[in-house]
Image: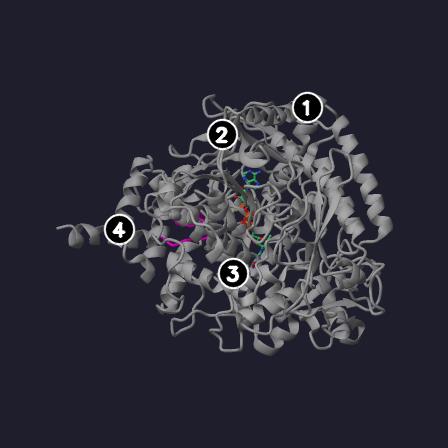
């Protein structure tokens, strides 16, 4: 396959960026999108030019490092996959593809396609955990947990923290990301003791980091590589309300 | 320097308790005064950093990743072992200990393995308390499965994403501390130098991968939890950035490197399909429970697999190992696949693959049953290859997966450099010459949650520390060395890319230091790697500069180390004149092609001391004695 790419190039967070056009040739349809970018970078390096910087590591859809806007869609046209899992057979020979970073105010561009998503980590640091010190945990089977509860918690916990939900949302909301963590822990008995403080601190932190608010467009669910359900957002809202109505007098 | 393994005396089941009692404690009020650096925040590093902060130590952690959650541990699929005996099938710490020593082909330290088996149950308790959603049965209790040919069900799992869930658990605890200010975390920082003062580890120099700046950090002790070095082979199931820089540079500063040649090659991976390929993908071992491995009996059989009749197929594992069949251990399955392909019996466009066929299982149990069990793996296979494994057999081939070797550590997990500890895949302990499935997650978390918190206290409590900070002259020296290396690389301005060299190294390693090794091949590998290294220093072209984020500069630094480590691995393999576990020397095999150990001459840990640039390393032997599990030839017939 031969393709034309419009790639966002930006040297660092303080200099303005812009699109540069490249062509790549003889791409195997079995190659992944990132392997196609490897070919482009190999060409650039051989010419002594700076390669296109992008984040990646596991290349099997689990670490959440990769994240590219491809033709205006987070992780590209295929449903339920991360950029590293997207195969070139989803495109046609001769296509022109627009390649950009995930854009959102709380995700400043570091270089080219790499953005800084540590705002996600700071949200987790504000409450996305159960406070248990090492040692002294009761036997793992001491508290039975219904299979469907644990399965539902697991579905929420599969979030890879890639930021596609934010990039896909016109408001730049992190609601799906936060809701996935809130749900995961709210559904388990271990998460109960800190249930109220958790949701309140995480939501406050999300606002503080500059993420927008949710207006229920469901774009996040559509683009999530792990297909995390928006019903988690409803659960997060209930958790928040519960705190306001019941706990806080 | 003589190797002091510090294995406690007494009956093995009491050793760890007695040792813990004998370790000196740091007064709670003083813990804050001790500063510990943790390099790497995968399972081993994140669990260590959080546990040390729980105790009150002053902890600073580093990772080249953007977030601890992106560490390579996230990719582990199958599960984590613990002998809870929830399945009531006769499991115990003793049995896990026995299986691990035997599985490691009698090349691991008994005392360490016993301790690992002993603490592993606590790991599961700890993870459940953190909210790790392990699979459960309808009654609400935890589910276990049998994994990697084990005869008991002791593997805890979270669908095919166990590593992810365990790492998110450890990450959540680390995050709790970062949020509270009790751990300082520096992301996108790569350790490039270890700093020694008066022979003790007192700090590190890191490269800030965003700005390019070199930064100095001092401490009372340094923990390396930087993962495995399988990417010396270029293609592996490791994450792309996984590298050996931290351990290799520490080795060059005096830490002995043990058993470098023990590499695990996993039998069920998606085969290489083209030159563009950047990494290999693992297909979980569990597939061998229901899939049958075969090849056509006839060479260059161009028929599609469905058209090859039953009597013209060779189910070679079932034929060679009637009792274990397709479930033989990883090293055996991998080696046999290579043997068949070397004979020209391989399948697929490149002829380096064998079939893994689910037709019988589908006929027997229905497609829905397979879908329920392996749906996500089948989808992944389909995604990558474009073929539908429900209707045509998968094609699989072995790939580099795990490195059992690593920096030598004593029973306290301290390296030969006082004050430098090594955890997780980065150290050599516990797995011997072959690792059993679901044991790496167990070891990383045992090291981080339940061993280092005790043993580091003893070092801190019994050492008198000179006041040292970043202004010490040793820091300036280390920083200069790191700066000099980058400048040298940038100045070469040659004609070949960093990746060219890495691929060339990988090819040599795979052909000569891979599944089958022999004297001639190893010698030629040493020569060609040396030559490649010379070429690298004359002809590499590194695009970038000392300032700012430059992926090529990052990679070049890592490849420099792989080019040295690769030769070193070949040397270790050359010296070990026996076959054991993942180390198969073709000269040493039984008449029917099984690994032939030489216990008389090689029952030791080979711990190598760095000999100086371009010079041969010096061998130190830690004898291995087996008091509880008597060495025997492994048999799976
Ligand atoms: C595909 C796959 C599946 C697996 N499945 C299983 C399984 O089912 N069960 C099992 O038990 N094991 C499994 N393993 C093995 C297991 O996942 C690993 O051995 C284990 O997770 C390693 O953990 P770690 O903490 O030692 O290292 P890692 O998770 O690799 O973490 C290394 C850390 O060190 C950091 N780092 C490295 N170098 C530097 C440096 N120079 N400076 C700063 N930071 C640095 C990295 O950023 C990272 O944070 C699997 C492995 C693979 C590849
Ligand atoms: S590279 Fe890890 S999810 Fe894509």
**Residue denoted by label 2:** B468
User: Is A159 displayed left or right of B224 in the figure?
Assistant: left
Q: Mark 2, chain letter?
A: B
Q: Mark 4, chain letter?
A: A
Corner quadrant of residue B390: bottom right
Q: Nearer the viewer, residue A203 or B41?
A: B41
Q: Is residue B265 above or below residue B296?
A: above
Q: Residues within 10 Å of mark 4 (few under 14, many from 20)?
A: some
**Residue denoted by label 1:** B488
**Residue denoted by label 3:** B16
Q: Mark 3, chain letter?
A: B
Magenta residues span: A219-230
Q: Residues within 10 Å of mark 1 (few under 14, many from 20)?
A: few
Q: Quadrant of the N terminus of chain B?
A: top right
Q: Position of residue B36 (x, y in %)?
A: 47, 40
Which is more N-terminal, label 2 or label 3?
3
**Residue denoted by label 4:** A237
Q: Nearer the viewer, mark 4 or mark 2?
A: 2
Residue shown at 67%/62% (left/top)? Answer: B104
Q: Nearer the viewer, mark 1 or mark 2?
A: 2
Q: Position of residue B533 (x, y in %)?
A: 76, 34
Which is more N-terminal, label 3 or label 1?
3
Asked if residue A229 is among those painted magenta in the image, a careful observer would answer yes
Which is more N-terminal, label 2 or label 1?
2
Give the CA distance from mark 3 to mark 2.
33 Å
């Amino acid at each position: 396959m031969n393709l034309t790419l419009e790639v966002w190039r930006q040297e660092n967070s303080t200099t303005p960026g812009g699109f540069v056009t490249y062509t790549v040739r003889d791409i195997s349809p079995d190659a992944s999108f990132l392997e196609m970018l490897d070919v482009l970078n190999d060409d650039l390096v051989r010419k002594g030019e700076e390669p296109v910087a992008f984040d990646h590591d596991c290349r099997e859809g689990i670490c959440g490092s990769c994240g590219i806007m491809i033709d205006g869609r987070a992780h590209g046209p295929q449903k339920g996959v991360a950029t590293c899992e997207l195969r070139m057979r989803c495109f046609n020979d001769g296509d022109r593809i627009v390649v950009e970073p995930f854009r959102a105010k709380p995700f400043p561009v570091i270089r080219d396609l790499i953005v800084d998503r540590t705002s996600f980590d700071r949200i987790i640091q504000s409450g996305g955990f159960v406070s248990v010190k090492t040692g002294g945990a009761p036997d793992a089977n001491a508290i039975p947990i219904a299979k469907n509860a644990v399965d539902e918690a697991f579905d929420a916990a599969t979030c890879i923290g890639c930021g596609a939900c934010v990039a896909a949302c016109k408001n730049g909301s992190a609601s799906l990301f936060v809701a996935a963590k809130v749900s995961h822990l709210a559904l388990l008995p271990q998460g109960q003791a800190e249930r109220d403080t958790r949701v309140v601190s995480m939501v406050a932190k999300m606002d503080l980091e500059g993420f927008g608010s949710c207006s229920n467009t469901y774009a996040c669910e559509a683009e999530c590589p792990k297909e995390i359900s928006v019903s988690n957002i409803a659960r997060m809202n209930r958790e928040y309300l519960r705190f306001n109505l019941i706990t806080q007098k | 320097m003589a190797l002091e393994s510090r294995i406690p005396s007494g009956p093995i089941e009491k050793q760890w308790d007695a040792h813990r009692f004998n370790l000196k404690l740091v007064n709670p009020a003083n813990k804050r005064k001790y500063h510990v650096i943790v390099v790497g925040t995968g399972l081993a590093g994140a669990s260590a950093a959080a546990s040390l902060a729980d105790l009150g130590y002053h902890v600073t952690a580093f990772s080249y990743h953007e977030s601890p959650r992106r560490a390579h541990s996230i990719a582990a699929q199958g599960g984590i072992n613990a002998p809870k005996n929830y399945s009531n099938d006769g499991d115990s710490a003793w049995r896990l200990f026995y299986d691990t020593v035997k599985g490691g082909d009698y090349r691991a330290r008994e005392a360490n393995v016993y301790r690992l088996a002993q603490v592993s149950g606590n790991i599961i308790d700890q993870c459940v308390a953190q909210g790790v959603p392990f699979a459960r049965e309808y009654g609400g209790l935890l589910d276990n499965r049998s994994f990697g040919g084990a005869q008991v069900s002791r593997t805890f799992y979270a669908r095919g994403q166990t590593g992810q869930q365990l790492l998110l658990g450890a990450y959540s605890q680390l995050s709790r501390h970062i949020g509270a200010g009790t751990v300082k975390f520096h992301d996108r920082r790569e350790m490039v130098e270890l700093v020694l003062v008066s022979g003790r580890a007192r700090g590190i120099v890191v490269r800030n991968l965003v700005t390019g700046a070199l930064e100095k950090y001092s401490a009372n002790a340094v923990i390396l939890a930087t993962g495995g070095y399988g990417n010396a082979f270029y293609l592996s199931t490791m994450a792309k950035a996984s590298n050996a820089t931290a351990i290799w540079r520490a080795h060059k500063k005096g830490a002995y490197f043990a058993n470098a040649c023990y590499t695990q090659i996993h039998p069920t991976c998606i085969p290489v399909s083209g030159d563009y390929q950047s990494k290999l993908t693992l297909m979980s071992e569990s597939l061998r429970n229901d899939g049958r491995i075969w090849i056509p009996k006839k060479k260059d059989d161009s028929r599609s697999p469905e058209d090859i009749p039953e009597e013209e197929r060779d189910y070679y594992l079932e034929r060679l190992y009637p009792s274990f069949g397709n479930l033989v251990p990883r090293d055996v399955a991998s080696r046999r696949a290579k043997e068949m392909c070397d004979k020209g019996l391989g399948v697929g466009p490149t002829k380096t693959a064998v079939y893994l066929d689910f037709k019988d299982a589908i006929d027997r149990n229905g497609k829905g049953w397979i879908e329920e069990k392996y749906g996500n793996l089948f989808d992944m296979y389909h995604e990558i290859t474009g073929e539908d494994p429900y209707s045509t057999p998968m094609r699989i081939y072995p790939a580099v997966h795990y490195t059992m070797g690593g920096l030598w550590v004593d029973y306290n997990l301290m390296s030969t450099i006082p004050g430098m500890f090594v955890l997780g895949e980065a150290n050599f302990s516990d797995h011997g010459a072959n690792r059993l499935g679901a044991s790496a997650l167990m070891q990383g978390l045992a090291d981080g949650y339940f061993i280092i918190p005790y043993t580091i206290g003893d070092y801190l409590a019994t050492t008198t520390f000179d006041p040292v900070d970043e202004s010490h002259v040793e820091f300036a020296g280390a920083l200069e060395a790191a700066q000099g290396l980058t400048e040298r690389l940038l100045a070469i301005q040659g004609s070949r890319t960093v990746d060219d060299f890495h691929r060339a190294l990988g090819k040599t390693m795979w052909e000569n230091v891979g599944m089958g090794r022999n004297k001639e091949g190893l010698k030629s590998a040493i020569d060609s790697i040396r030559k490649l290294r010379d070429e690298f220093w004359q002809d590499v072209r590194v695009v970038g500069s000392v300032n700012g984020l430059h992926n090529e500069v990052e990679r070049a630094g890592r490849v420099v180390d792989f080019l040295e480590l690769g030769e070193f691995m070949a040397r270790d393999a050359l010296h070990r004149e026996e076959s054991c576990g993942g180390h198969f020397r073709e000269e040493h095999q039984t008449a029917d092609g099984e690994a032939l150990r030489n216990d008389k001459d090689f029952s030791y840990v080979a711990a190598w001391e760095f000999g100086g640039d371009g010079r041969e390393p010096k061998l130190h032997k830690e004898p291995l004695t087996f008091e509880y599990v008597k060495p025997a030839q492994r048999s799976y017939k």
